[in-house]
Image (cartoon, rainbow, N blue to C red):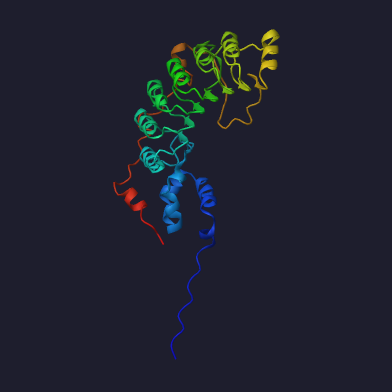
Amino acid sequence: MGSIPPASTPPPPWVELPPEITTIILQKLGTIEILTTVQLVCKTWRDLCVDPAMWRIIDLRNDMRNDGSLLDSAYDLEKICRHAVDRSQGQLIDINIEFFGTDDLLCYISQRSGQLRRLRLVFCYHLSGEALSKAVKKMPYLEELQLYYTRITKEAIEAVGHSCPHLKCFRLNSQGFRRPQIECDEEALAVAENMPSLCHLQLFGNKMTNEGLKAILDGCHHLESLDLRHCFNLCLEGSLERRCSQQIKELKRPHDSTEDYEFECHIEDFESSDEDYSFRFSDIDHMSLDDDYYEFSDLDDEYFDYADLVID
């Protein structure tokens, strides 16, 4: 009597999920996890991970340990980012970069992402305003730009306004200071004069004065929300307070709670010389880490060859 063939092993249940649902689930794991782990699980996931639709959103969120080192410092994040952008094949619409990034990388992204709608740069100390000015010229459909503790100039803000006519949301966030008291309306004036279609504006920790705020109210007639928390040079009272309340639907004042702010936002309050201040966060010149902070251990040249292997 012939032997009974062994029963075939049924496929894992996740394989039968609709591709679009699986893609949404996998995207929540983040770019690094997808490239280093997810695509090696099975052929079904591998096929999804090479589909450009998977890379319409690239999230390179990162965190720092207490000692200042990056949690994902074992990887060459710039190389991973370039690989992810290549896989998008021009379909990228949303990218988030945190704690790394260079002028060359931003140029690389802009040359291959003409459909980009949202750009978020967090603690990108080594990114210049000049590079941003050049990059946004290739991002005509950009609707949202978020800059957290990232170097920028008024010229870069002007370039964004000129190059991105669809921009609706702009965030330019810095470290808030009570003292030393340094007043600067350059960023506020650049926004007011070059971003008339803004609906949402966040200038957390900005050093603008009442004059800068008045310019924004005069130049940005479509503003629905305005976040002025930690803008300690402002004095919202009298007619200016009334105007803000009447013109802005959602207004956050300099001393409002920061409980919902996603980053640590302690207030610097000390007497210091301008020379000392230059080494602190500001919206003109940000504190830099050691020049080698972003030079992570390079992956072997075969890294992405290895990652391309499919585990059935």
On screen, residue 197 versus residue 243, left or right, reads: left
- Which residue is situated farthest in the bottom direction here? 1
Q: Is residue 256 visible?
A: yes
- Which residue is situated farthest in the left direction here? 301
Residue 65 in percent (x, y) is at: 48, 38
Residue at the (34%, 30%) spot, across then down: 104
Residue 226 in percent (x, y) is at: 61, 21
Residue at the (42%, 58%) spot, across then down: 43
Residue 97 in percent (x, y) is at: 45, 34
Residue at the (34%, 41%) spot, across then down: 297
14 or 279, which is in the foreground? 14
In the image, residue 312 sits, relative to residue 204, either above or below, namely below
Tell me where residue 204 sits by quadrant. top right
Quadrant where the N terminus sits is bottom left
On screen, residue 36 versus residue 238, left or right, reads: left
Quadrant where the C terminus sits is bottom left
Q: Is residue 75 visible?
A: no
In the image, residue 262 sits, relative to residue 25, either above or below, namely above
193 or 149, which is in the foreground? 193
On screen, residue 232 versus residue 193, left or right, reads: right
41 or 173, which is in the foreground? 41
In the image, residue 260 sits, relative to residue 133, either above or below, namely below
